[in-house]
Amino acid sequence: MTHARLEFPYTRTTGPVIGALLTAIRDGRIVGSRIGGRVLCPPMEYDPVTADALVGGEPELVEIGPGGTVGPWTWVAHPTPKHPFDHPFAFALITLDGADTALVHAVDAGSIDAMTTGMRVQAQFAAEPRGAITDLWFVPEGHESPSGREPHGGDTPPVTSTEHLISLEITEPLLAHRVRFAQGLLDGKIIGQRSSASGMVFVPGRGYDNLERVLLTEADDVVCSDRGSVSAFTVITPVQYYGQQETEPYIRASILLDGADQALIGVDIRDIPVAEFRVGMRVQAVWRPEGERDVSELDNRWGGIWEHVIERWQPTGEPDADPRALEKYSF
Amino acid sequence: MNASTAHKRYVPARDVAIVATAQTPCSRSYADTEPSMIMRCVNSLLDDTGLQRSDLEFTIAGSCDYLSGMPFAFVSNIDGVGAWPPVYESHVEMDAAWALHEAWLRLQLGDIDVAIVIGSGKSSPGRPREVYALQTDPYTMAPLGLDTISLAGIQGRALLDAHVATEADFAEVVSRSRRSALANPNAQVARDDTIDALLAEPYFSAPLRRHDLPPISDGAAAVIIAAGDRARAITDGSTVGFSRPVWIRGMDHRIESHHPGLRDLTQSPSTERAAIEAGVHEGGIDVAELMVNYSPEEIVLRRALGFPSLATDDTDINPSGGPLAGHPVMATGLVRVIEVANRIGAGTAHRGVAHASSGPCLQQNLVCVLEGDR
């Protein structure tokens, strides 16, 4: 099985309405907004019935709760890692005292037997708020935590942005053509696929010929040369975004292997000076010693783990290939 | 809102028909790439119609990169259509039923006659429950990990609290869907379960049991649509595909608030409105395929579409088993269209309705009316 984690760290500005809600929650209070004669929670930036902008452009905030009444609910018997609690709890539509519409949120009720439609709940506020909706949760009335925070004044700046790390786990078996490709790398061979329909050699193979729309099989596997020509490259100066591990500029190159009709893309070049690197340069793979080749990070996706099996690409010293003939092999 | 409301609905200027359909079986984990699933569907459509790829004047797909967790997966999906020469392409990050809507409108412009619509999804690599939570409000819901199963549970409870349905009604939907799926070679869950046996199962997200939820499926589906005489020419004399065009008589989609607290979860006014705009009530309905991802949704949808009673209405509802028997996310809604079209194309039904939904608790709904020539 291959495993990957896809993460997107979002920081969102809140605007004056959601910002007011998250500021209030941080400070141990809850607010709704009065729109069209009703008090809505969550407060809205527009009239949800007419879609009109707010009168005067400013929300009319109303403090509501901290008590509320449970409407329809579900008992989350098997929480996900993204839920507010790691033990069973309820999600419920909760109409806070003073509000006309319900907020969907979590009730830490201990047991499904404690849950009924119409029950009373009380808001609880995080001891260490983060300025997010998760600073709030609910418990059945009479079960408030003594360590719960009391409301306090807005002596700190209002919440103007809120952070949400999206993190997805991806687990899947390595597909059959990737298994053969991985075994080839361990054996010091680059396995591609030749389509008899188009005659093209694709490397790495993808299990199909995307020109003639033909599925390819093991019978179409071919061993490609580990020597080729640089067909395109870029010099990347790392920006220090979330998750960035690079600090120094480096080259990412496309290499058209001899006999192939598709370039390897995203090949790391670390030891050839940028000033010397060029399209047309002839290079050859220098494999890591057998036993030191690692394909454990190979998955079904794009890009390579070339550096885990090929130590580096070494200029061969041959005369350059014609750059014009390489133009169509950038990717 | 009801059928008698004085309102002139949009009637398409140009007759457009579904002329061929294809779908992969739904599987818990499909052991090949998403483009290869698409390629199988595209090749099947071209074989059935005798069309060349160059005859496809517009290509549109519905898919979601978050599902398999591969950024720009929708780009490599085009490999399944054939990467060269370039296609005139569009994409929706929505169920492919909405891609069909765009293609149908595109053909209304009159300059092209043939389009292909593709939906595909591999849910197996990810954790769908965590993925779908990301479609909720990013400030007040997504950080709670508020997932569609939990929201469906809330909707189910709303139906129980309002005495619109019972848990036995939910189980009846599941029992009937799974039994119908026994005749569907593409179904993933097909079995004969009694209502009592289903009710004896433990809750997963009360009041829902695991069988009230759809299976996790990989799969793809595609259709070719064509305008007027071109549609007739493609189906005339066809021996493997449709023997007659399946005309799209109307199609409409409507959306409600993303805040469940602002909605009455026992009703689906967006479905009611879309049904009127699509012309559902302008003739009899032989067959209806509804995107019932969670069993309580069928009860809401039947009420909204005007066949609330299984006892008195003879419309055949979800003869394929529906999404409870197979849920290839991003293709599930298009498969509803396909299941209706296949029955009309084969002549076993004359007029039918297909429904697709998007978002939690039937937030957004698309209704499509299909009809064969007499």
Image (tube, coloured by chain):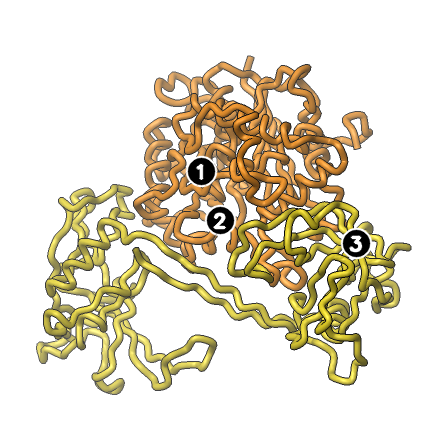
Chain colours: A yellow, B orange
| Vertical order, B21 against B253 (above or below) | above
Query: Which residue lies under the disc numbered 1?
Result: B116
| Front position in the image: B249 or B208 | B208
Output the chain of dot 1: B
Q: Are marks 1 and 2 in contact (CB under 8 Å)?
A: no
Q: Residues within 10 Å of mark 1 (few under 14, many from 20)?
A: many
Query: Which residue lies under the disc numbered 2?
Result: B90
Disc ID at residue B345: none
| Front position in the image: A2 or A197 | A2
| Front position in the image: B163 or A150 | A150
- Is A310 situated left or right of A134 in this image? left
Identify the image quadrant of residue A147.
bottom right
| Vertical order, B329 against A132 (above or below) | above
Q: Residues within 10 Å of mark 2 (few under 14, many from 20)?
A: some
Disc ID at residue A120: 3
Q: Residue at x 82, y 29 (%)?
A: B6
Q: What residue type is labelled 2?
A: Ser
